[in-house]
Amino acid sequence: MGETTMERAAGEEEASPPRRRRGRPRVRTALASGVLLAAGGVAAVAAFGPGGDSGGGTAAALPPNTTKVSRQTLTDTLSEEGRLGYGPAHTALSQLRGTLTKLPDSGDQITRGHELYEVDGEPVVLMYGSKPSYRPLRIGDEGSDVKRFEANLRALGYDGFTVDDEYTDGTAAAVQEWQDDIGVPETGIVELGRVAYASGAVRVDSVAANPGEPAAPGKKVLSYTGTAKAVTVELDISDQRMAEKGAAVEVTLPGNEDVPAEIDDVTTVIEAGEQGEEPTTKVEVTAWLDSGEAKKAAAEYVLASVDVAFTAGERENVLTVPVAALVALSEGGFGVEVVKGGASSYVAVETGLFADGKVEISGPGIAEGTVVGVPK
């Protein structure tokens, strides 16, 4: 078999101005067809024909430089800047008609059973639940909304009824007692709009109206968040692998203290382009600081910039080479140029995790210390 020709071109990574940040530097690793992008540089590879015992070919000349296969732990990580705050804001809409007579202040924290705002001198009360009210509740009604309201009544200390999906005489009697306590007519009927549901205690983020303005169904009254601290990060769509719900992240607070957090929500958002530019797609990640350690450390900060370290994968005690050492095989897949003495040959390899400019490899004759070619 005649010799085959391989073209190997490599460019050293262009220096870019350093980005001043606390904590870890941002690292990106990506693999494209025929072009490998890594922290160590860019390697453009050409295919070569099969040959040799291991399915590779014989090199026309020795590589310009070499390195040794090493054994190490590879970790696919990314550090991004995030915002410490209270997580995403939600909107409270009025379901009552009348006049807004009292509103909370930004930053106020409100818990179950307390007034969120006031219409015609009567309170709209916060209750806990995942769905909003959509109808009045009265004797004979059945449904999950009945059970949700009864569960809140029970949590507030009212009794004489069973927490289920039926609105009974006992429920109506407890509602009359509750209505007397909050200062509204004792009808035994929960009118639509008297209760506002949120997933838990809320912190008023901003107020969208003023006392004296009319209230009407659909009118935005205020926006609110939860009361727990959270970190929000925007990732490029190419880094979506980093954002898995339930995955652990490490947050570096302004005082360089590291605390653990867990990804709670991952949302794809589209940001409008400016001055005729195309919209961009981002991945918004929310991680709550739920642990006692994290809550204590973050308590002194209301809003702050933080660093968030993501880990998408880790491989312990594996054989690795620089990504630039890979070459594309004409029959498919990748290989490396193994150098022995004054000759070299191409050996097909299986690739694993790519991280920090390195790639996990395995294949016949590949062992720790094996000499392979790399660009100059």
Image (cartoon, grey):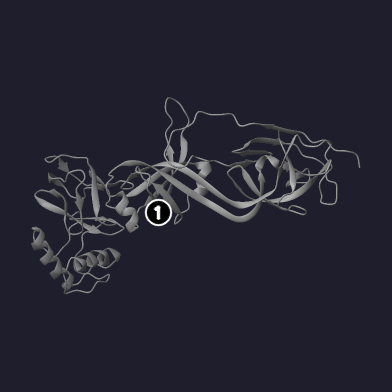
Q: Position of residue 329 (x, y in %)?
A: 76, 44
Q: Point out the image quarter for the C terminus.
A: top right
Q: Quadrant of residue 82?
A: top left
Label 1, residues with CA under 10 Å away: few <14, some 14-19, many ≥20? some
- Quick check: can you spot residue 219? no
Q: Amino acid at mark 1?
A: Pro
Where disc 1 sits, the SS reads strand
Q: Point out the image quarter for the N terminus.
A: top right
Count of picture labels: 1
Q: Disc 1 designates what residue?
A: 260
- Quick check: can you spot residue 259? yes
- Camera-side residue: 240 or 222? 240
Task: Examine the rendered structure and indicate whether residue 319 appears above or below residue 41.
Answer: below
- Camera-side residue: 368 or 282? 368
- Camera-side residue: 62 or 6? 62
Instruction: Indicate left or right for 114 with 83 as reference.
Output: left
Task: Examine the rendered structure and indicate whether residue 19 appears above or below residue 200.
Answer: above
